[in-house]
Amino acid sequence: MKIDSLNFKTFFLGIIFLLSFQEIFAQSEQQRELEKRRQEILKEIEQVNVLFFSSKKQTQSVLQQVHELDIKLRARQKLIDITNQQANLLNRDIRRNEQKIKDLTYELSLLKSDYADMIRKAYKSKSDQSRLMFLLSSDNFLQAYKRLQYMKQYANYRKSQGVEIQDKTLQLDLTNEDLAKQVTAKEVLIKENMEAQALLLTEKKEQEILVKNLKKKERSFANEIKKKQQEVDRIDKQIQKLIRKAIAASNKGSGNTGSIKFSLTPEAKILSDNFVSNKGNLPWPIEKGLLVLGFGKQPHPYVKNVYINSNGVRIATEEGTKARAIFEGEVLEIQVISGANKTVLIQHGNYISVYSNLGKVYVKKGEKIKVYQEIGKVYTNKATNETVLKFSIFRDSDPQNPADWIYRM
């Protein structure tokens, strides 16, 4: 009976261990993913500091200061949120390990008690003579054989009990080590979170002062934003005009010049399908950068009744940064646009990626382009010390939201 109950107990504990292992593995994966995201946000905050706050710009308007500080605040809040998630996950791990230590301690005490009782009984009947007499007193050969098997099973059981005690002791030691590491990790996260919250509070106060100054001259700032929007609209219309002209030129061979959509060859159709199949996973048009303006129509966060609209996105980056192709294709057009400097259009079937505000261009019209290929150097405005890439994606002549196409934009 002892052997059967041991096998059942071992099987039952194995099932529990397997389920616990799956839960631990899932939580470890989640913790690794959160840590990866936290490191990305820390790099983002570092980039914000380098791009916007490494040197005070005397010529910078209050409007621009508020905008840049808002980007920093959003990144700081994301960091706090991720750190809270990590701390909560660690709390669950700590509680689980504390319960595991209690269970292991209890199981170990039972095993040791059982083992000690077994050793005492074995000591009382330890002589070879008593074991021999036990065999010789058998009524027949079959009974003797069964008694011999019982003695072997009993010896194996004793051995397995000793091994199980060693295993449980090792598990207990490892769980205690894990618990100590988790407690330390939690303390570090809590400290970092408190520091981040203190910085967030300071930056929010700074932002409140700037917003108050902004409110005093809200009308003049509203006019400034509207003028900038008119400039953006003019550039967007010029780019769409370029695209429609390029579509008409591309469709000449098919005789479909009146269409506002590309007439695709079989090869171009394959390229277009490949572009679509990579939606959401396309690389950024620069290696490092921060999104400073999103796609579409959006209310201004601080100036009432004023809207910002854009056919693409704006990405702030460091001086000297090279723009790169997000997918293979062909250079459709290169133009100098007032207010957008040099602009490169790359065709990917019936999709077009647009890279504006380039100071230098490294490609030529009609050139076949590979993904990640450098196509130009982003222009740096010497007056404001800003390096901003204006980036758009079009399906034929219809603007698309780049955030839907670019990985984690």
Image (tube, grey):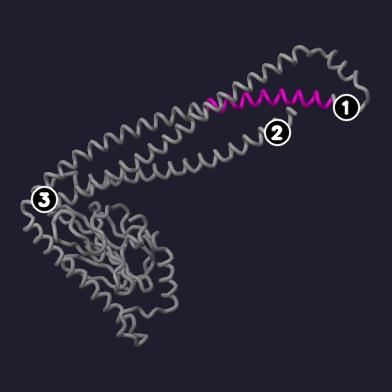
Residue at 39% x, 60% y is 280
Q: Could you say which quadrant of the image residue 46 lies in?
A: top left
Looking at the image, residue 154 lies above or below residue 282: above
Q: Earlier in the sequence, mark 1 or mark 3?
A: 3
Residue type at the position of mark 2: Asn
The amino acid beneath tag 1 is Tyr
Q: Mostly what secondary structure, the magenta segment?
A: helix
**Viewed as shown, does residue 131 lie left or right of 91?**
right
Q: Is residue 42 visible?
A: no
The answer to whether 246 appears left or right of 3 in the picture is left
Q: Which residue is mark 3?
A: 62
The residues colored magenta run 148-174
Residue 88 on the magenta segment:
no
Residue on which disc 2 sits? 7
- Three-letter code, disc 3: Val
Q: Secondary structure at mark 2?
A: helix
Nearest to the observer: residue 370 or residue 91: 91
- Picture layout, residue 275 above or below residue 200: below
